[in-house]
Image (tube, rainbow, N blue to C red):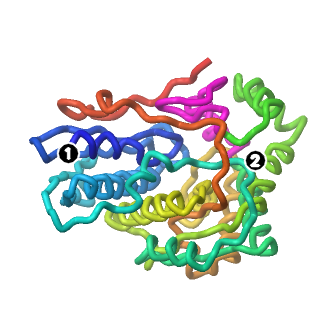
Amino acid sequence: MLRVLDAARWAPSGDNAQPWRFVVRGPLAFDVYGYDTRAHCVYDLDGWASELAHGALLETIATAATRERMHARISMPEEHESRPLCYRIALESDEAIVTDPRVDAITQRTVQRRAMGTRRLTDGERSALEEAARPARMAWFETLRDRAPVAALCTRNARIRMTIREAYDVHRTVIAWHASTSEDRMPDASLGANRLLLATMHGAMATFARLDRVNRVMGTLVPRVSLDFVPGIRCSAWLALIAEHPPSSLDDRVAAGRAVQRVWLTATTLGLQMQPQYTPLLFARYARDERRFTGDARAIVRARDIDADLGALLGAGDAPKAVWLARIGPQRPVPGRSLRLPLTRLMVSSPPGQLPAPQPLP
């Protein structure tokens, strides 16, 4: 059980938030308490992003259990259960289980935010990724002509996250500056920016007033092109996971997160890397739901534009069903990496009411 949990902690989560804690109930039984970050994160106002991460964690547990010749029996919480959500796990021996070939990829999986190679994916690679996604299906954007509109969409979307106060409040707490690794944040070396841009970002983000002045004087085009457009065309493909129907329940969102992790682990075993681009889907959903996620009226209008652009890209029927958007390409070294909290800090005797919000670092 401890080996399974030690592998499970490497599951991905937004901004390396790790919104979970483990409570052991017996030699082969434990509870996963799933939290969300809606109280302090504009990217999780409805808790959906955290619930996707819960799904990725549960898929990681199930995958890691196969190495122990065990099946992970997962009992889901009720939809309207009070938070934190409690997922009950029992590990059951089964000698017929074969170790999942993706198990080693659990700790090898990384996010690649820099430019990737542009070689075409093989038919076998696409088939393996599509099989991992089922029952969700994939929409592919592979040629340069197809990749460019997705890159442009993400570049326009980046203007929202680079300018609104609500996103600034998140970024100043989740970035570990002058770091190549971090147990509970994103090290700045992993952000995909060169040293000059990192220095500019760090200085500008001292206060929101300073960031706002820099944005007004210098604009956001240069960082958006560097961090979004250029990497967006320098990849093998973009992929979107399209669910069978718009996710409307906890079960839907957890299932989507499990599919995302299967795809990501499969990509890793194939020698591929991914970079998620979740915020275009998020801001588009906020616009569809008429959720006022910021006090910046211009950003509200831009979110509506992102929703329209996403509908044009995926199709009006599929855009609300999209649960994941990412670019993919051949593996290359990653200069920085988010680590994870040690298992001793994730295992608790009783779950806290809520996890503490991260605090800004110097």
Q: Decide whether residue 181 is among the magenta residues.
A: yes
List the residue tagged with mark 2: 227
Count of numbered marks: 2
List the residue tagged with mark 1: 31
Pick the residue in front: 318 or 131: 131
Image x and y of residue 198, in percent = 76, 31
Pick the residue in front: 189 or 242: 189
Q: Is residue 224 left or right of residue 27?
A: right
Q: Is 93 drawn above or below residue 2 in the view shown?
A: below
Image x and y of residue 199, in percent = 78, 27
Question: Dividing the picture into quarters, in which one does residue 307 lie?
Answer: bottom right
Outermost residue to the top: 362
Q: Is 289 drawn above or below residue 341 in the view shown?
A: below
Q: CA distance from mark 2 to mark 1?
A: 39 Å
Image x and y of residue 111, in percent = 58, 48
Amino acid type for the residue under numbered disc 1: Asp
Question: Dividing the picture into quarters, in which one does residue 74 lie?
Answer: bottom left
Q: Residue at x 45, y 76 (%)?
A: 131
Q: Which mark is residue 173?
A: none
Q: Residues within 10 Å of mark 2 (few under 14, many from 20)?
A: many
Amino acid type for the residue under numbered disc 2: Leu
Magenta residues (range): 161-190
Pick the residue in front: 31 or 167: 31
Image quarter (top left, top right, bottom left or bottom right) of the N terminus:
top left
The disc, 2 or 1, on the residue closer to the chain's N-terminal end is 1
Image x and y of residue 329, in percent = 66, 61
